[in-house]
Amino acid sequence: MSDAKSEDKNQNLSTENICPNCGLPLVLRRTRNGYIYGCPNYPLCDFVKNVTAQGVTVLMVMDESPCPQCGSPLAVKKSRYGLFIGCSNYPECNFIHEEKEDNPIQCPVCGGGVLRQHSNKFGKSFYSCTNFKICNFTLNYKPVQRTCPDCGFPVMMLRIGKSRRYLQCAKRGCGYKMRMDDSEI
């Protein structure tokens, strides 16, 4: 009985999209991960289509800011990794605005890349080299351009504890820590 009710509810939300396999109009269905367009002839035809392209939703279109690649307005978008600014003409233009750092820190391992902040799917931030195909150097804490007095490694990490701040050497195995004042950062 509940299947018939949910089936009627799904039929009322039908869209103008057509199933490429069987030619029937697709219906909007709710799944545990969100909404999809599915074929009403489900057991015989298993075609599904995402409602939003790759889980990206447009929050606001900025008409006054044109895209440098195609001239379309830029848009504030949200994905599973957070907010970003990209072109509103997405499938044709894949421009994404990236913040430029004032003093980028060179990768101490390969020397060709720059350490950039990223976030994983759980929202935790980490820093890695931009030459990720060649170099797999990563840090879990913010890098600071200081040389370690013990081993001479050119990058240290800023660690913030409950009551103090300190720098720790980013080289595995070194473990050198230096206490910091707030004025030193």
Image: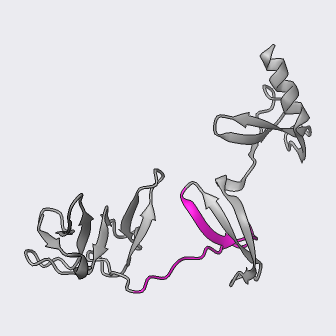
Counting from the top left corner in percent of width and height, residue 81 is at 53, 58
Q: Is residue 121 left or right of residue 170?
A: right
Q: Is residue 153 left or right of residue 87?
A: left
In the depicted structure, whether residue 72 falls above or below residue 35: below
Which residue sits at x=10%, y=75%?
A: 151
- Say whether residue 20 is magenta: no
Which residue sits at x=31%, y=61%?
A: 140
Q: Nearer the viewer, residue 20 or 149?
A: 149
* Residue 128 seen in render: yes
Q: Is residue 182 left or right of residue 78?
A: left
Q: Nearer the viewer, residue 18 or 146?
A: 146
In the depicted structure, whether residue 16 falls above or below residue 172: above
Counting from the top left corner in percent of width and height, residue 103 is at 37, 86
- Magenta span of residues: 81-102
Counting from the top left corner in percent of width and height, residue 166 is at 19, 69
State the residue lying farthest toward the top.
Answer: 1
Quadrant of image for the C terminus: bottom left
* Residue 137 seen in render: no
Counting from the top left corner in percent of width and height, residue 36 is at 75, 41
| Residue 157 picture quarter | bottom left
Which residue sits at x=91%, y=37%?
A: 24
In the depicted structure, whether residue 149 falls above or below residue 4: below
Name the chief secondary structure element in magenta: loop
| Residue 115 picture quarter | bottom left
Quadrant of image for the N terminus: top right
- Say whether residue 99 is magenta: yes
